[in-house]
């Protein structure tokens, strides 16, 4: 059986299939994940992450398509609290009357105590990086809705799943794994598109990358998190940005990315490249100063120009005047084929259990003991 199923759902506004009982909605450049059997009754499915601001109605329509009109989740699980993952959280939590769960080290940013560390807009060389200075970074306050994920690693309302700490992109970032078929919901621990590039984001060109550079303030932890996910050898993954990936291409690509992390994923320069933001249980303690040079200013100016051009093109596209060419997306599978694919082994590879790489045990550097860092090593095998 092929490791990657060659199919693309023609409608960008519909839910798509990742693995049995795991579907997602792609909204602009962000994925929102639904975990539950199609047609699951009220309170018997789960939403993972909450998309962009203004996306609540779109998410609710997708939920109705999957589970039926009026069906509500049992919980909302957050991989982390950046604005593109919590944009609709207030509306959804209120309208569905549902609890929201996140890691304890993420709570300062979701209870109004602290804003996230500043972005680094001059890394990655893309328009999305430059635009990151416009993204709200909190503090966000979910009030009494927000709860801490259970310390035993279980995921509320997601039987058979467990959460694992994968910090780096944010202090309390988590990923979710289902061991029975090694399905991974990775959040932004790594992504399957070049998120710094607005062009790549729009065309959904599938390729493995580290966490989005412009909002990653701790590259030491990000490296170790990616190495442990690569050791897990996931059979299927959906990340916060980009299309799902499966099988040996995913596993081989992850191992290569992990082994070459410092040259392929860590930025060549930038505010956090060699010195992380320091955080603790109350939020941000200290951040390194920004790094600005003539070269980076020139790159930023060029990126701004490209951004303006693309925004104009998108506006015309929305008016029906310009249509960007459809990108080839070889590893996206429609929800409509989920039953067929599940019956045929789901389109994911179960033969790779013996291919898991061993961790080299490298300790994270440049993080003072006072940083309040999250202990993150978990043997995923």
Image (spheres, rainbow, N blue to C red):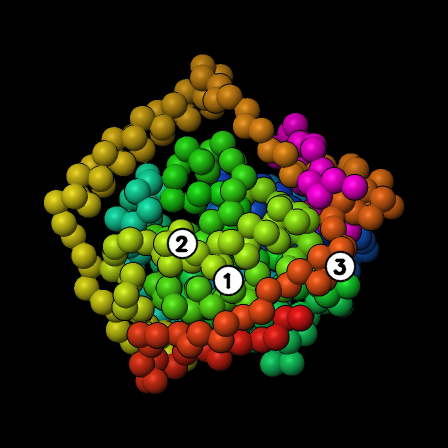
Residue 56, can we see it? no
Q: Is residue 291 left or right of residue 152?
A: left
The residue labelled by disc 1 is 226
Q: Is residue 286 above or below residue 176?
A: below
Where, quadrant-wise, is the N terminus in this rendering?
top right
Q: Earlier in the sequence, mark 3 or mark 2?
A: 3
Residue 359 pos. (x, y %):
54, 70
Q: Which mark is residue 181?
A: 3
Circle 1 Cα neighbour tier, 10 Å, few/some/many (<14 / 14–19 / ≥20): many
Q: Is residue 282 magenta?
A: no
The residue labelled by disc 2 is 265
Q: Is residue 2 magenta?
A: yes
User: Which residues are the magenta region?
Assistant: 1-20
Q: Residue at x 71, y 57 (%)?
A: 352
CA distance for labels 3 and 2: 27 Å
Q: Earlier in the sequence, mark 1 or mark 2?
A: 1
């Amino acid at each position: 059986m092929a490791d990657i199923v060659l199919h693309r759902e023609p409608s960008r506004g519909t839910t798509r299939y990742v693995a049995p009982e795991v579907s997602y909605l792609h909204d602009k450049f962000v994925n929102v994940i639904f975990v539950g059997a199609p047609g699951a009754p009220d309170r018997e499915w789960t939403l993972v992450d909450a998309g962009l601001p203004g996306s609540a109605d779109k998410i609710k329509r997708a939920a109705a398509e999957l589970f039926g009109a009026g069906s509500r989740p049992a919980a909302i699980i957050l991989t982390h609290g950046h604005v593109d993952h919590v944009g609709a959280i207030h509306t959804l939590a209120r309208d569905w009357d549902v609890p929201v769960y996140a890691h304890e080290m993420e709570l300062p940013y979701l209870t109004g105590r602290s804003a996230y560390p500043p972005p680094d807009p001059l890394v990655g060389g893309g328009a999305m990086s430059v635009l990151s200075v416009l993204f709200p970074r909190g503090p966000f306050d979910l009030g009494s809705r927000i709860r801490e994920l259970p310390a035993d690693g279980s995921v509320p309302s997601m039987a058979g799943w467990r959460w694992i700490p994968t910090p780096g992109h944010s202090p309390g970032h988590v990923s979710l794994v289902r061991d029975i078929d090694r399905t991974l919901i990775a959040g932004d621990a790594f992504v399957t598109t070049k998120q710094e590039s607005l062009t790549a984001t729009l065309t959904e060109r599938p390729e493995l990358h580290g966490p989005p550079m412009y909002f990653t303030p701790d590259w030491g932890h990000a490296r170790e998190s990616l190495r442990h996910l690569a050791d897990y050898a996931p059979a299927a993954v959906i990340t916060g940005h980009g299309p799902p990936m499966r099988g040996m291409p995913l596993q081989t690509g992850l191992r290569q990315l992990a082994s070459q992390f410092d040259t392929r994923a860590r930025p060549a320069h930038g505010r956090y490249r060699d010195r992380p933001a320091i955080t603790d249980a109350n939020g941000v303690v200290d951040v390194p100063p920004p790094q600005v040079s003539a070269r980076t200013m020139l790159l930023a100016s060029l990126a701004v120009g490209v951004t303006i051009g693309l925004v104009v093109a998108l506006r015309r596209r929305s008016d029906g005047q310009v249509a960007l060419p459809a990108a080839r997306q070889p590893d996206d599978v429609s929800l409509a084929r989920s039953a067929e694919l599940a019956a045929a082994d789901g389109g994911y590879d179960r033969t790779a259990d013996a291919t898991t790489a061993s961790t080299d045990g490298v300790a994270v550097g440049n993080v003072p003991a006072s940083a309040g860092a999250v202990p993150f090593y978990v043997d995923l095998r």
